[in-house]
Image: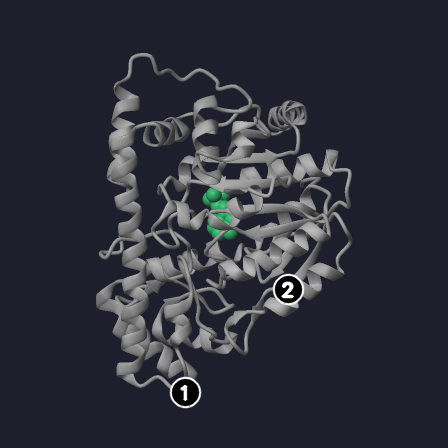
């Protein structure tokens, strides 16, 4: 007997469930394109050379220890992470208008940000979220007691951005609402606004006094260039507007399980930033007390050392380039096998994922007949593909759409 027998069974996580099914599949042809983690050409997880070296230095440093960090994490890490996102010359940073704390990767940063807004945001406690978005966005903000509302983002007919629909929905939302934006490499669609479209989004954000909350999980992973991938949020920050940023080092440093990230709240006044920071720390204190030190120590050493920084940038570009090569490889293979339809979106989409346009029954055929594991919305992780497998994947797609 148990007093918890009436606890309802939670539904399996859409993505982690796919990995389980993949593991159980004994076919030699099986491919896991579900999970969003980088794989080498050999299909193996990658620990970056810059990370290995930084870790070696951390372990060899006699002044390092295992004491608790402060609630806000490693101060140097926070400074370097904010500069990486906003740019070294950022006025907000120079004027001390940012409160930045180390959090548990991107998810933890979003959660602490959501908790902070839920307690202290004087505007509408409503977060506008794109359709579709990373599934956890809505769940995280709901758990914080915030309302959520969707805005149009992806247009299936064009497999591109529904720019008009997006602006229309944002304009129709209450003034002052929180606007969640993917800084680059939108997950799951791989569709980003152009710089011109970002300007339009910025204008509506300003005229509606919305509070942008950027989710930056792929800086450097999209284009291979850290500054280029930070351009959207810098465009917003450089106007002097108040905003939030959840930053993850899971993908770009490959520090997934080390849980390295940062939350920045940029405000209009340095005195307000101090108060905000004090509340972010209390929020952390009550949720997990303080963040883990190992991964952030590694990231700090990379971000603070010009040689390691150069090495990281090169390795990051290497990952972005391999993904780009896989896009071309899959596109070429689709042409070669004669898959019907237009597949140029595979080349145009940005970042780790491709939104193939496959329907749910087509995805079921991919998995059941071809042992290709992917999410039911038709998303595949390009980082899970290798040159030798493009042809097989193209055959599977051809068979599924015909
Ligand atoms: N935001 C987006 C858009 C993501 O794709 C992810 C990772 N899948 C995250 C946030 C959070 O990842 P993590 O907590 O591992 O940094």
Q: Of helix, strand and loop, which one carries label 2? A: helix
Q: Residue drawn at (40%, 42%), measured in percent from left and top?
A: 256
Label 2 residue near ligand 1, CB within 8 Å: no
Give x and y (percent) for residue 315: 27, 45
Give x and y (percent) for residue 387: 23, 65
Q: Quick check: 137 left or right of 347?
A: right
Q: Quick check: 81 left or right of 119?
A: left
Quarter where residue 373 is shown: bottom left
Q: Residues within 10 Å of mark 2 (few under 14, many from 20)?
A: some
Q: Residue drawn at (48%, 28%), measured in percent from left and top?
A: 78
Label 1 residue near ligand 1, CB within 8 Å: no
> Above or below — where is 256 with respect to 81?
below
Give x and y (percent) for residue 115: 67, 36
Q: Quick check: 33 left or right of 130?
A: left
Chain-order first, disc 1 or disc 2: 2
> Above or below — where is 19 with respect to 376?
above
Q: Residue drawn at (37%, 76%), measured in percent from left and top?
A: 369
Determine whether label 1 and label 2 are within 8 Å by CB: no
Alpha carbons under labels 1 and 2: distance apart: 32 Å
- Is residue 51 in view from this perspective? no
- Is residue 90 in view from this perspective? yes
Q: Residue drawn at (48%, 34%), measured in percent from left and top?
A: 82
Q: Which mark is residue 166?
A: 2
Q: Which residue is mark 1?
A: 402
Which residue is nearer to you in this view: 183 or 242?
242
Q: Residues within 10 Å of mark 1 (few under 14, many from 20)?
A: few
């Amino acid at each position: 007997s148990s007093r918890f027998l009436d606890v309802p069974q939670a539904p399996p996580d859409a993505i982690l469930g796919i990995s389980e099914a993949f593991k159980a599949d004994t076919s030699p042809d099986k491919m896991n394109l579900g999970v969003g983690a980088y794989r080498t050409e050999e299909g193996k997880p990658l620990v970056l050379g810059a990370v290995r070296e930084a870790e070696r230095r951390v372990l060899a440093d006699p002044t390092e220890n295992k004491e608790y960090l402060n609630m806000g994490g490693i101060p140097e890490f926070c400074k370097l992470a904010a500069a990486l996102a906003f740019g070294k010359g950022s006025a907000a940073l120079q004027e001390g208008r940012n409160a930045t704390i180390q959090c548990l990767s991107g998810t933890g940063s979003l959660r602490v940000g959501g908790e902070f807004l839920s307690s202290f945001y004087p505007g509408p406690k409503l977060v506008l979220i794109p359709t579709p978005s990373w599934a956890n966005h809505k769940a995280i903000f709901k758990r914080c007691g915030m309302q959520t509302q969707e805005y149009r983002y992806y247009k299936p007919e064009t497999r591109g951005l529904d720019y008009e629909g997006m602006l229309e929905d944002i304009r129709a939302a209450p003034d002052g609402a929180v606007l969640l934006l993917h800084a680059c490499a939108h997950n799951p669609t791989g569709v980003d606004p152009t710089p011109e479209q970002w300007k339009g989004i910025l204008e509506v954000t300003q005229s509606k006094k919305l509070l942008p909350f950027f989710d930056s999980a792929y800086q450097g992973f999209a284009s291979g260039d850290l500054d280029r991938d930070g351009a959207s949020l810098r465009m917003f920050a450089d106007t002097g507007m108040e905003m939030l940023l959840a930053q993850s080092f899971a993908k770009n440093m490959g520090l997934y399980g080390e849980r390295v990230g940062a939350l920045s709240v940029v405000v209009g006044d340095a005195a307000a930033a101090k108060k905000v920071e004090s509340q972010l720390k209390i929020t952390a204190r009550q949720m997990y007390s303080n963040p883990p030190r190992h991964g952030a120590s590694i990231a700090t050493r990379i971000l603070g050392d010009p040689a390691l920084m150069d090495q990281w940038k090169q390795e990051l570009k290497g990952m972005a380039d391999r993904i780009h090569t896989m896009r071309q490889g899959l596109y070429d293979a689709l042409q070669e096998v004669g898959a019907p339809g237009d597949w140029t979106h595979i080349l145009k989409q940005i970042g780790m994922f491709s939104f193939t346009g496959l329907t749910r029954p087509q995805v079921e055929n991919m998995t059941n007949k071809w042992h290709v594991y992917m999410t039911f919305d038709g998303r595949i992780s390009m980082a899970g593909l290798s040159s030798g497998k493009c042809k097989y994947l193209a055959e599977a797609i051809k068979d599924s759409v015909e």
